[in-house]
Image (cartoon, helix red, strand yellow):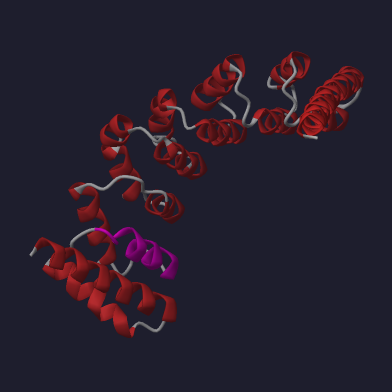
Amino acid sequence: MRLHLAALSLLLALVFQAGCVGGAQQKNRDERQKTREAAARYETGGWQDRLGAVRDLAGFRGREAEELLLRALDDSHTLVRIEALRSLDGTASGKSRRRVRSLAEYEPNGNVRWQAIRVLGGFRDARDAVVFAKGLSSEDWLIREESVKGLLAIDDFAIMYVSIPYILQALDDPNLNVRLAAIENLSVRDERIYKALASMLGDESAGGHALLKALLKSLAGYRLDGLTLKRVTSLLVHQNAEIRVLALRLLKRDRELKKNDE
């Protein structure tokens, strides 16, 4: 009886494996067919047809699909180029990454460069830190915003440490959205960053409720100095309920940290 059960289990495993292999082969055939159809539309159609063709290739990993998307990065229409970048998002190909990196660093079209930086940030590659740092000097606040997000997404201690001057630059950015992006994506603690956050907390003209909420969240984990402690305490009677709650949580966290030091 046990022998029969073992044989049946082995047979089922082989059937399942064969089914998986067959399914993968069919998927590859379907993908190749769709790639050929998209390539034909790209070659013969107008910009809207080309846009649809590159959109249909999103997530494809075949060499032919990748080559078509890389060609589309040089398309004469901006929207087609942007869609090609979106379709390349997440690809592990070194060739594609290098092309995206080049656009993120040197592309003169601001919309295309912004999308390239956005895609590049998804790779979370320490080698791209220089590109993001360079983007923080752009005159376009959208590029600066996406650049600081990409920089802070890199999970590398050495990169985090050397990036602090650029983080401080983003925290002092004239655009509120850039400052918010830096605060909400902070992944490193440093006394210089704390001082910048505390200073912003004391500047009533720095921004609205969104910035104040982000600051209260980002200060959690720091031991508050006397002046910052007073400022946070004053927020316990703020007109906004969420701000009151965040202030109370921050004060409790501060007490816990200081108690542990005793």
Q: Is residue 213 covered in magenta?
A: yes
**Residue beneath the point at 34% across and 62% down:** 215
User: Is 196 positioned to the left or the right of 137 in the image?
Assistant: left
Q: Where residue 4 sits in the image (x, y, percent)?
A: 82, 31
Residue 238 versus residue 53 in the image, above or below:
below
Is residue 224 visible in the rendered image? The answer is: no
Q: Position of residue 133 (x, y in %)?
A: 38, 32
Please determine whether, in this image, residue 40 is positioned above or below residue 201: above
Q: Which residues are the magenta region?
A: 209-221
| View extreme (left): residue | 262
Quarter the C terminus occupies: bottom left
Is residue 70 at all visible to an observer of this figure? yes
Residue 262, placed above or below residue 18: below
Of the pair 24 and 258, the residue shown nearer to us = 24
> Which residue ends up furthest to the front in the rendered image?
1
The structure residue drawn at horizontal position 86% and vertical position 23%, both measured from the top left corner, is: 22
Which residue: 78% across, 27% down? 10
